[in-house]
Image (tube, rainbow, N blue to C red):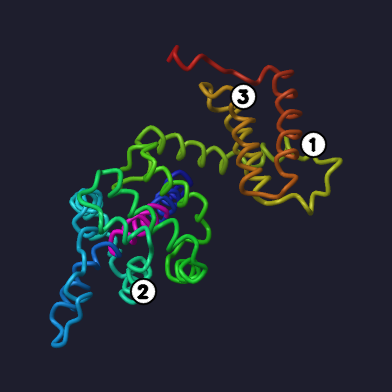
């Protein structure tokens, strides 16, 4: 198998892993909302029923946000294809539904006459943010049972936040658009193939740094940025530096942003001095 094929497969596997966990995270609150119908059936079938048993609201199970999501073919096909149902634990669904039913937010939602689409989304989002994300037990369960949750938690949380905020159109069949996936594959391939050259550029800039203490992720970010400098002509060098500084600050050590900034700035000056940077206007393609 060629390096290009291998790197492409690695990327696809990671993207699939992230997308699967993202789907589970989005669908879990929906499964909890849908449990209202099961709870209603169980309570109404009791031989000795209380008034509470006779008045279980199923409003949340039928709300517009839940119905639209479960009707999406890209979501249902993803769940079927990847066999994601195994990640929904019935005991956790029941437990979280019970917690939900005892909250003032839920009681207010069920008692109000009618509801807007915003209200319907808000109550499902409430399940995710307040009952799940803020629960150490739920997060521990996710870490134990969802492959890739720990490694990709920050990315998945960002995707879920974007989903609820409508900041990006969600496609549950693929994580990246075709052009972004092409860029990711090309960058990954460049980082792998040009590793030795990138390290030759980086090494002289580590004179004042303890090489043994440089974070692995920082070295990877430097290699990625260098490849963008040299082999991606439509990405401005300033954009590259700023983006990798932000990534280092978010995902690496406290001093990583400053480290990446300093090293990349020095490497860029050398490359420009040697006239190796060839950038073009994105609109000129």
Residue for badge 1? 205
Image coordinates of residue 28 in percent, x first then y, are 33, 61
Q: Viewed as shown, does residue 72 lie left or right of 239?
A: left
Residue for badge 2? 95
Q: Nearer the viewer, residue 58 or 235?
A: 58
Q: Viewed as shown, does residue 158 lie left or right of 71?
A: right
For the point 74% across and 23% down, the residue is 269
Most extreme residue toward the bottom is 47
Picture mark count: 3
Most extreme residue toward the right is 208
Residue 28 in magenta stretch: yes
For the point 75% across and 24% down, the residue is 270
Q: Viewed as shown, does residue 283 lie left or right of 278?
A: left
Q: CA distance from mark 1 to mark 2?
A: 55 Å
The image shows residue 90, relative to residue 247, as above or below, that is below
Judging from the image, what secondary structure is the residue with disc 2 in? helix
Residue 136 in magenta stretch: no
The image shows residue 123, relative to residue 272, as above or below, that is below
Q: Nearer the viewer, residue 272 or 3?
A: 272
Q: Which dot, 1 or 3, sits closer to the camera?
A: 3
Judging from the image, what secondary structure is the residue with disc 1 in? helix
Give, as a single range, the part of the protein colored magenta.
Answer: 18-31
Judging from the image, what secondary structure is the residue with disc 3 in? helix
Mark 1 or mark 2: whose residue is earlier in sequence: 2
**Label 2, residues with CA under 10 Å away: few <14, some 14-19, many ≥20:** few
Mark 3 or mark 2: whose residue is earlier in sequence: 2
């Amino acid at each position: 198998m060629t390096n290009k094929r291998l790197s492409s497969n690695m990327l696809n596997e990671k993207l699939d892993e992230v997308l699967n966990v993202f789907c589970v995270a989005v669908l879990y609150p929906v499964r909890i909302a849908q449990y209202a119908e099961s709870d209603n059936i169980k309570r109404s079938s009791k031989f000795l029923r209380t008034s509470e048993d006779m008045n279980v609201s199923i409003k949340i199970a039928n709300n517009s946000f839940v119905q639209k999501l479960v009707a999406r073919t890209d979501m249902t096909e993803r769940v079927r294809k990847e066999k994601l149902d195994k990640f929904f634990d019935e005991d956790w669904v029941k437990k979280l539904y019970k917690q939900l039913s005892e909250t003032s937010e839920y009681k207010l939602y069920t008692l109000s006459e009618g509801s807007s689409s915003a209200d319907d989304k808000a109550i499902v989002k409430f399940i995710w943010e307040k009952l799940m994300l803020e629960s150490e037990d739920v997060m521990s369960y996710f870490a134990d049972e969802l492959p890739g949750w720990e490694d990709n938690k920050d990315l998945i949380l960002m995707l879920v936040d974007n989903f609820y905020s409508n900041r990006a159109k969600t496609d549950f069949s693929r994580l990246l658009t075709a052009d972004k996936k092409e860029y990711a594959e090309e960058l990954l391939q460049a980082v792998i193939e040009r590793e030795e050259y990138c390290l030759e550029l980086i090494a002289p800039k580590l004179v004042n740094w303890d090489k043994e203490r440089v974070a692995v992720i920082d070295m990877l970010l430097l290699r990625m940025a260098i490849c963008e400098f040299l082999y991606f002509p439509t990405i401005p060098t300033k954009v590259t530096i700023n983006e990798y500084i932000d990534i280092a600050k978010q995902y690496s050590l406290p001093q990583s942003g400053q480290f990446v900034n300093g090293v990349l700035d020095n490497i860029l000056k050398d490359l420009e001095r040697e006239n190796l940077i060839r950038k073009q206007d994105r609109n000129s393609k």
